[in-house]
Image (spheres, grey):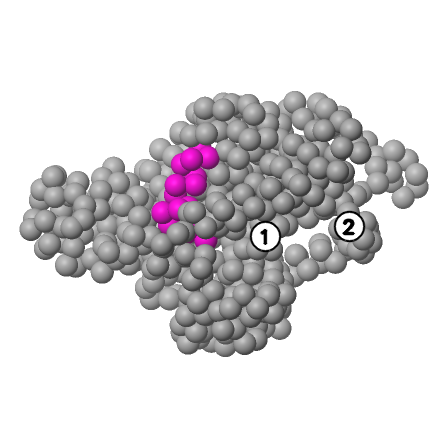
């Protein structure tokens, strides 16, 4: 960070807030309006805090590596617009004019990392290449996607709109790690757009142009930056689509008869989509992904510091080994670190969130009973989708990470969906009576809340 960060950051904050207040009425309703500015504010807080933590606590890190590359591209624009444009579009192979710049950028040939540099470089052209302002741009972009995620959740289940706001926006790990100049900021926003697009285009079948554009944009960003998020999302989302359409069949007998077929079609379509997306990809080809996970686990575990490494058992990259360590991977991703495992302030935040997840999960299944709880999940498509996505993603990141420092960043895409599903499940299972038997007052009926949830 430099002196210009101190002067320009307040100016751009004012600009972003001005835009936010101007568009708030268009993208909110009486239920959601009060969360719009606070949700954006914690994103900005996360973006600024991320830079400060990496500079003064870690003494460097990925966010400043991205900024270093961004400075090189910005420098190229200052000397030759055409050369800068070639770098911005990642022209391959680089020509003679580009070599003096690409020789300094060790991520130029790393497509997933350089995709972040391309976005940051585009933002840098409008903010004098200021690190903190670029971080605010990432936070604002990420917020747009997460607002789409929130709108989708409350469109499905408006009665839980208050707690869904907590699940999507106000988990500390999510707004801290998902807001600054990092891959995670783009990906959590892109996941929100993909979620919005899938629901509105394939299930609700409304606002089709917007849904298709946002869904395609989200999928493209995930494919470019972290395709494994899309690999986890796609099977669960396709199964969700088939389940929703199955529930619209009026005949109960026909619905039960066709449900196994819908499940098989959803699972098959998800698998074909995943293999098609990654065929030939050196890092994420489904045929090689277990082997790659083994390499990542060993590498990241070897770099663990401050006692943050964890062990989920022997893993050799095979399918059998994956199934064997899957339960441990799920536990470590969703419910750990435990409070007694905390070794630093970052781990403490993650441990508090994990404790919340443990308490909510245990209390919900205690209240409903295990079988009734599972039946509720299977019978509610949004719950089945959210838990399935969270569990599949948890297995992937739990196996790959090897240490809590890495895991706390990797797992943030699953957190809004897992906690959101818990809150929806809690709302569906609660009795609408007080302990004394009096009816609990409702601010609005479910039907009215459903209408209010519409912000498109």
Q: Secondary structure at mark 1?
A: helix
Q: Is residue 91 above or below residue 14?
A: below
The stretch in magenta equals 214-228
- Residue lying at 71% horizontally and 23% vertically, measured from the top left: 448
Which residue lies under the disc numbered 1? 390
Q: Position of residue 179 (x, y in %)?
A: 43, 48
- Residue lying at 87% horizontally and 38% vertically, measured from the top left: 433
Q: Is residue 334 above or below residue 190?
A: below
Asked whether the viewer can see residue 190, the reply is yes
Q: Is residue 246 left or right of residue 114?
A: right
Asked whether the viewer can see residue 33, the reply is no
**Residue 230 located within the stretch drawn in magenta:** no
**Residue farthest toward the left in the current orientation of the protein:** 96
**Residue 224 located within the stretch drawn in magenta:** yes
Q: Is residue 2 left or right of residue 141?
A: left
Find residue 304 and report its image quarter. Answer: bottom left
Q: Position of residue 81 (x, y in %)?
A: 12, 39
Q: Position of residue 248 (x, y in %)?
A: 70, 29
Q: Secondary structure at mark 2?
A: helix
Q: Is residue 239 left or right of residue 143?
A: right
Which residue lies under the disc numbered 2? 373
| Of the image marks 2 and 1, the number of the one nearer the N terminus | 2
């Amino acid at each position: 960070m430099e002196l210009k960060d101190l002067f320009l950051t307040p100016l751009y904050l004012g600009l972003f807030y001005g835009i936010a207040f101007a568009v708030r009425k268009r993208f909110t309703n009486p239920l959601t309006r009060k969360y719009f500015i606070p949700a954006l504010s914690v994103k900005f807080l996360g973006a600024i805090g991320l830079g400060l933590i990496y500079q003064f606590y870690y003494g460097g890190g990925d966010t400043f590596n991205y900024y270093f590359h961004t400075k090189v591209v910005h420098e190229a624009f200052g000397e030759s617009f055409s050369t800068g444009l070639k770098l911005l579009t990642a022209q391959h192979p680089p020509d003679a004019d580009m070599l003096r710049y690409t020789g300094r950028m060790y991520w130029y040939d790393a497509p997933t990392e350089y995709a972040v540099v391309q976005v940051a470089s585009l933002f840098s052209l409008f903010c004098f290449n200021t690190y903190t302002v670029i971080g605010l741009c990432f936070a604002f972009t990420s917020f747009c996607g997460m607002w789409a995620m929130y709108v989708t959740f409350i469109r499905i289940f408006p009665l839980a709109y208050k707690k869904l706001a907590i699940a999507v926006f106000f988990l500390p790990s999510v707004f801290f790690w998902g807001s600054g100049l990092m891959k995670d900021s783009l990906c959590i926003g892109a996941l929100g757009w993909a979620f919005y697009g899938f629901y509105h285009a394939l299930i609700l079948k409304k606002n089709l142009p917007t849904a298709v554009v946002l869904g395609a944009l989200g999928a493209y960003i995930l494919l470019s930056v972290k395709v494994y998020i899309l690999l986890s999302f796609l099977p669960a989302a396709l199964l969700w689509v088939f389940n929703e359409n199955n529930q619209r069949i009026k005949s109960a007998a026909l619905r039960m008869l066709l449900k196994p077929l819908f499940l098989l079609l959803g699972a098959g379509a998800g698998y074909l989509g995943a293999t098609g997306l990654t065929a030939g990809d050196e890092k994420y080809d489904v045929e090689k992904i277990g082997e790659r996970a083994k390499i990542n686990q060993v590498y990241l575990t070897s770099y663990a510091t401050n006692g943050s490494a964890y062990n989920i058992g022997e893993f050799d990259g095979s399918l059998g080994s994956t199934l064997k360590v899957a339960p441990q991977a799920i536990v470590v991703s969703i419910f750990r670190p435990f409070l007694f495992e905390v070794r630093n302030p970052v781990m403490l935040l993650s441990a508090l969130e994990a404790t919340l997840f443990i308490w909510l999960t245990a209390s919900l299944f205690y209240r409903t009973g295990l079988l009734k709880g599972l039946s509720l999940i299977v019978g509610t498509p949004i719950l089945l989708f959210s838990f399935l996505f969270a569990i599949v993603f948890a297995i992937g990141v739990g196996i790959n990470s090897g240490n809590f420092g890495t895991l706390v960043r990797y797992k943030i895409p699953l957190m809004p969906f897992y906690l959101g599903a818990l809150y929806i499940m809690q709302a569906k299972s609660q009795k609408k009576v007080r302990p004394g038997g009096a009816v609990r007052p409702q601010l609005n009926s479910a039907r009215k809340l459903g209408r209010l949830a519409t912000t498109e």
